[in-house]
Amino acid sequence: MLLSVNNLAVSFGGVQALSLSHFSLQPQELRVIIGPNGAGKSTFLDIICGRTKPDTGEVYFNDRAIMGMTEVSIARLGIGRKFQQPSVFPGLTVYDNLLLAAKMKKDILSSLFFKPSQLLKARIHEVAEKIGLTKVLSSIAGALSHGQKQWLEIGIVVLQDPKLLLIDEPAAGMSDEETYKTGELLLELSNNHGIIVIEHDMKFVQQIARERVTVLERGKLLVEGSFNDIRNDQRVIDCYLGRNNTQLENL
């Protein structure tokens, strides 16, 4: 088991944001989490990566309890987080953004005398090819399209060699073509990483949800199942999918 969660709960100002009795993820599993706004999706990822401390509960990553650990310590264990809004260095090139993300010593002395090895350069080019940015490696990151910035940030996380990727609404603001390319990228990455994706775009969910989909409502697990299972579940339609009939009709 890559990730296991038991009796996880957190409240903000007396309002319960999450109450999850159980959640588990296998290595190299891509799990999509959906649900209406306020369902606890981002809070769940915040707890896993150490940004938010739960009131109760346990989270195990590779059979190791990680509650109480710092964000940095959790990241070093192999959990990488990509937020909804890209946070690249806009004044640096794509290559330099990837170089800064690579796993290496980052103390002052090491940085002063650092020269990337051929192995590291090859790894950067390998990741750049995977995320579709080989042709723009020398371009300034701030000049990239929204979709390209999202792919760059995914590449930045991948270069940290995580075992688990936490991806928050990767298709938001993308064109249809960019959305499709992002889905194919995540499916390819799932061959080597466990991935949890939060998403609202149901066409995109249908593209990447090859295994289980988890549906949250008001911080609690509503249902889990295949895409077709949740798409046709009346509880899911009532609480979430029914709010966007256009998406359903187009699937």
Image: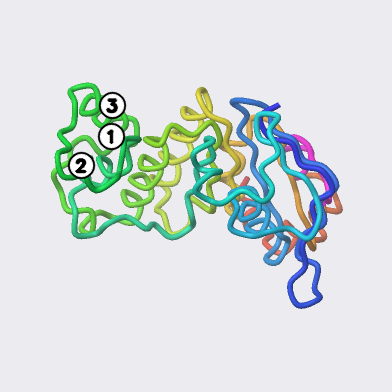
The mark nearer the N terminus, 3 or 2, is 2
On the image, the x and y values in percent for residue 204 come to 55, 45
On the image, the x and y values in percent for residue 168 come to 54, 52
**Vertical side of 114 occupied by 35: above or below:** below
- Residue named by callout 2: 95
Left or right placement of residue 241 versus residue 144 in this view:
right
Left or right placement of residue 41 versus residue 152 in this view:
right
Residue type at mark 2?
A: Tyr
Query: What are the residue bounds of the magenta stretch?
Result: 221-231
Alpha carbons under labels 1 and 3: distance apart: 9 Å
Residue 19, which numbered label? none
Residue 128, which numbered label? 1
Which quadrant: the N terminus?
Answer: top right
The mark nearer the N terminus, 1 or 3, is 3
The mark nearer the N terminus, 1 or 2, is 2
User: Does the stretch in magenta take in 222?
Assistant: yes
Q: Nearer the viewer, mark 1 or mark 3?
A: 3
Residue type at mark 3?
A: Arg
